Image (cartoon, grey):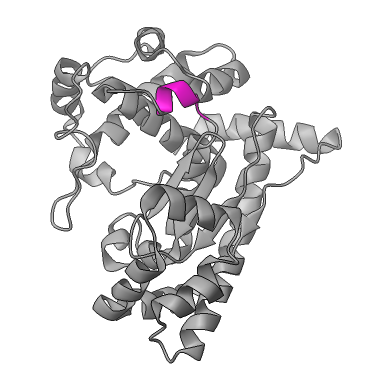
Amino acid sequence: MLGWALGALAYTLMASAALGAAPKGIEIQTEDVTRFYQVYQAAGGHPSAEQLQHGYLDPGTPGLHHLVKVRNVTAERIAQAIETHPELYTDAKTCMEALPRVRKRLNAAFRKLLILYPEAQKPPVTILVGRGRPLAISGPGDGVQIGIEAMCAPIARALNPSVDDRFVHVIAHEYVHSQQDSKLADGDHPTVLERSLLEGAAEFIGEMISGDVAYGYLRASTQGREKEIETKFAADMDKTDFSDWLDNTTPTKPGDLGYWVGYRITKSYYQHASNKHAAIREIIQMNDPHAFLAKSGWYPGIVLK
């Protein structure tokens, strides 16, 4: 945990409250989930593509329509997923019970974000039902879209066994992505360093506002191996081949060590900064990975508080 940093955060929150600060909240939309299950139940758990198109996708939120556009989520593919993996949709239905609790915790996390980073954009978070993947997508200006059926799937439990915690910490992480530099996030041929810092910044700020990182399972696999892992990272950081660092988690083997190294670089940056509020802005708006790394004070195996 970020003991001393969170203590400073608490002071900031109390001071802001004393000044009457009440930043406008960030909308958390769940109506797509409600509408999906109305269609699903009316069809006895076997909705057709036509029923899903007209009853679920067509009247969907902008967040759902964005997912459809960028990730090829069609009525036909959802209908096929329901028949092929029906457990995804029965499990997700039970996860709906967690949504009111998740909303309450996220509202608190977003209040912290808006106090720490007042210039934050406020796109909505949309919790919806997809075709089993992706788990979550986000980007500058696009908000956050979360697939409840993917978040409640067995493979997602590796992130966090608690449904509530999993939703809260993943959404906090993804919401930071919605604030990051669009040119860096969408650039061609990003390097291991660039992607790792984007993910590490989302982990660090997400932890500050929600209480933990999204990829907490990495703690166990990295403990005592900090210098070994980060020495290899330093040698690979300018590569564009992510296979050893990102997008490489499997059901039997955890990966994505770039998230963990990026988090540690970001944490080092914050701990070395004399102006913590400026550091938060610099972390979120980071657009020069090598300059950020140089200023962070990080080195392989660094001991962080």
Query: Does 184 appear above or below 225?
Result: above
Query: Does 108 appear above or below 11?
Result: below
In the image, 71: left or right of 247?
right
The answer to which quarter of the image holds residue 185 is top left
- Identify the residue at horizontal 50%, vertical 50% (top origin): 66
Percent position of residue 120, x then y: 64, 32
The answer to which quarter of the image holds residue 291 is top left
Q: Which quadrant of the figure contains the N terminus?
A: top left
Name the one closer to the observer, 12 or 127. Answer: 127
- Identify the residue at horizontal 59%, vertical 13% (top origin): 275
Q: What stretch is highlighted in magenta?
A: 180-185
Name the one closer to the observer, 289 or 161. Answer: 289
Name the one closer to the observer, 9 or 157. Answer: 157
Would residue 98 be visible to someone looking at this image? no
Percent position of residue 116, x then y: 64, 30
- Identify the residue at horizontal 40%, vertical 28% (top origin): 186
Would residue 194 be visible to someone looking at this image? yes
Whether the magenta-drawn stretch holds residue 79 is answered as: no
Percent position of residue 211, x then y: 50, 45
In the image, 113: left or right of 127?
right
In the image, 67: left or right of 9?
left
In the image, 221: left or right of 273?
left
Dominant SS of magenta comes to helix
Query: Does 41 appear above or below 147?
Result: below
- Identify the residue at horizontal 35%, vertical 63% (top origin): 161
Q: Which quadrant of the figure contains the C terminus?
A: top left
